Amino acid sequence: MRAKILTFLCLGILLSGYAGEVWVLAVEGEIGRGMVSYLQRGLKEAEEAQASAVILEFSTPGGYLDAAQACRDLILAAKIPTIAYVNREAYSAGALLAIACERIYFAPGGVMGAATPVYFDPQGRMEEAPEKVVSAVRALFRATAEHRGRNPLVAEAMVDRDVEIPGLVERGKLLTLTAKTAAEWGYSEGEAGSLAQVLELSGLAGAVLRAPAYRWVDQLVDTLTSPWVAALLIAVGSLGLLIETFTPGFGVPGTVGLAALALFFWSHYLAGLAGWESFVFFLAGIIAILLEVFVFTATDFGLAGIVGLILIGLGFYTAMTGPFTGPAEAASAIGAVALALVVSLIGFALFLTWIPKSRLRLGGVVLKTAIEERAVGKLPSAASPYVGKRGKALTDLHPVGKAEFEGETLDVVAEEGFIPKGSGVEIVRDEGYRKVVRRVKEG
């Protein structure tokens, strides 16, 4: 009996000193788009594990404002307590994330602030953002501080030189808080020399620390959202879908194209950039292109096609930029999207030129008409009542269009890829809903 009582007493002591798990997420180096993915996963898994709290350990010079805003929203929406540990600096975007946490602790010598937005000009020189951007970032800092019950003027002074706080910062200077001044102005709950001391000060002594590492997926998001890798994905995706549109069935081009576009939108969604408007623009553009090809085919690439290209471009552009994207980044995004679409159109034109001369389509599907034409010189007319009929192209066939045969207007597809309006054509294959034609040379 005494042994049982002693066992229960020991167990009670152990349980009373156990504060559960506390997750530690490291905000180190530049805050980029991979950091959004990292924090999103870390906060979600901590909530699922029913952790007692999450500590964000800061050692960062700042980073991209778009990424910082997405990270800030994740922290504010967290369902478990969040604690910032400034070890040793949280500058610029890092200051915003620290202010978004419920509690803030400083390591001895820690600093936080200096958050005015800056951009780099084409020559690589750093310049302060225009007043419009500074005002928007200032409001973002103010709203975050107000949400956490902190003095909003202190947060604004980190962003805007025109904010003056007597006894803290004079006009014309950006505010950077030290551990001491942060405690005096309500931006710190105290100093802690280690994470163990942070736990003690937070009433979590005895908690088990877990520190998930930066995953390969987070690094992949960083890589895939760089402008020129994104441009490669757009070019491959667009070219694959264009080729698939003009080949029977669904094969390798469509699979590769969809995979590339899925990677593009997935990575930019995880980075907090691609929203529903990006998908809506893209899908609307695809629909417009399909209407141009299969419904509104005319003598030239018409209005529906032009609108479709613009909408697709907008879909890609809005997925690569956010409200705080700098001019240089926006220019890179525009250049990447334009280059990718031009490359894909050139590649598609080369494909239309090459494929009629080839015995194979992509994916290994044999061009039956090409083989039969070389073997017997003419397709058997018994295959369909339409095969062998000759008529005239009513529109340019590039490659889809309309042609007239013995007074009947039919939707046709040019085997060569392009046949000009008014040319004589012959039906070489009947696919039911469309007829495949080739040009009949005079004489």
Image (tube, helix red, strand yellow):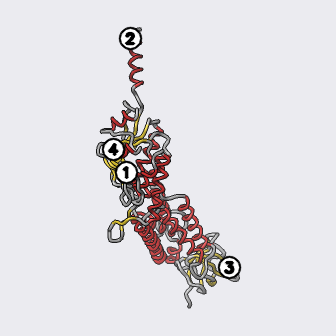
| Residue holding disc 3 | 409
In this orientation, which residue lies closer to the viewer: 49 or 308? 49
Q: Quadrant of the N terminus?
A: top left
Of callouts 4 and 1, the N-terminal one: 1
Figure label count: 4
* Residue beneath the point at 41% across and 60% down: 162
| Residue holding disc 2 | 3
Disc 3, SS:
strand
Residue lying at the far bottom of the rendered structure: 443
Amino acid carrying mark 1 in the image: Leu
Q: Quadrant of the C terminus?
A: bottom right
Residue 369 location in percent, x, y? 53, 74
Circles 4, 2 touching at the beta carbon (< 8 Å): no
Of callouts 3 and 4, the N-terminal one: 4
Alpha carbons under labels 4 and 2: distance apart: 51 Å
Disc 2, SS:
helix
Of callouts 4 and 2, the N-terminal one: 2
Alpha carbons under labels 1 and 2: distance apart: 62 Å
Residue 422 location in percent, x, y? 60, 87
Alpha carbons under labels 3 and 4: distance apart: 84 Å
Amino acid carrying mark 2 in the image: Ala
